[in-house]
Amino acid sequence: MDALRTGALLAATLTTAVMAGLFYAYSCSVLPALRGADAAVLVEVMQRINRAILNGWFVLCFVGAAMGTVMLGPTADWLMRGMQALLPVKRRVRAAIIEFAQSNGTVASGDEYVAPRPTHQELAERVGSTRVVVSRVIKELLDEEEAIRMDGRTLRVRLDGRAD
């Protein structure tokens, strides 16, 4: 699946860049050349350009840019997860714990979720860190935040009307 996403991203980027380059070259060369032409010459030149440009390469880039972008729609979540790597580890671990509790737990009372406790390795894989770093961060979070509790094999998260 990652290969498909990467391929779609590369195809969308490449074909969009080709189209942008084509439009830029057109606006820097053809349009200034036609600036002083009369209407009959302008119509003749534009019709010739339209006939010449409608070829397989143009259609591939024009449709490829749109199709690549459409294929990337479902991968927006994947791209945003890649952006999370720029966040501090503590914030990523906190967000992963909340997400885990919401997706794997049940609502105990009002705004509190109860879920089976994830392993430190599972959280490390979710946030792109090591188990050792995640273990240290979890200890800090448990000391600092009353909203997150881990006792035994149970995870309890109280949202208090906020979510990361």
Image (spheres, rainbow, N blue to C red):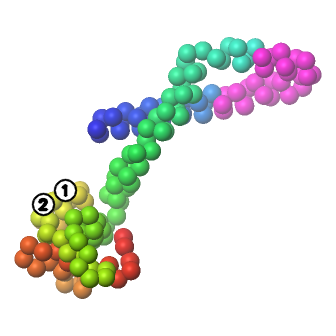
Q: Position of residue 89 (x, y in %)?
A: 27, 66
Q: How many numbered badges does the structure rendering display?
A: 2
Labelled pair 1, 2 in contact (Cβ < 8 Å): yes
Which residue in the protein does label 1 denote? 125
Q: Position of residue 156 (x, y in %)?
A: 20, 78
Is 42 on the left-hand or right-hand side of 161?
Answer: right
Closer to us: 117 or 61: 117
Query: Which residue is outermost to the left?
Result: 152
**Residue 31 appears in the rendering:** yes
Q: Residues within 10 Å of mark 1 (few under 14, many from 20)?
A: few
Is 86 on the left-hand or right-hand side of 148?
Answer: right
Q: Position of residue 90 (x, y in %)?
A: 26, 71
The image's mark for residue 121 is: 2
Magenta-highlighted stretch: main secondary structure? helix
**Residue span colored magenta:** 23-47
Q: Mark 2: which amino acid? A: Gln
Q: Quadrant of residue 113?
A: bottom left
Q: Residue at x 75, y 24 (%)?
A: 30
Q: Quadrant of residue 84?
A: bottom left
Q: Residue at x 52, y 22 (%)?
A: 60
147 drawn magenta: no
Quadrant of the drawing holding the C terminus:
bottom left
Query: Which residue is outermost to the right?
Result: 38
Q: Secondary structure at mark 1?
A: helix
Quadrant of the drawing holding the N terminus:
top left
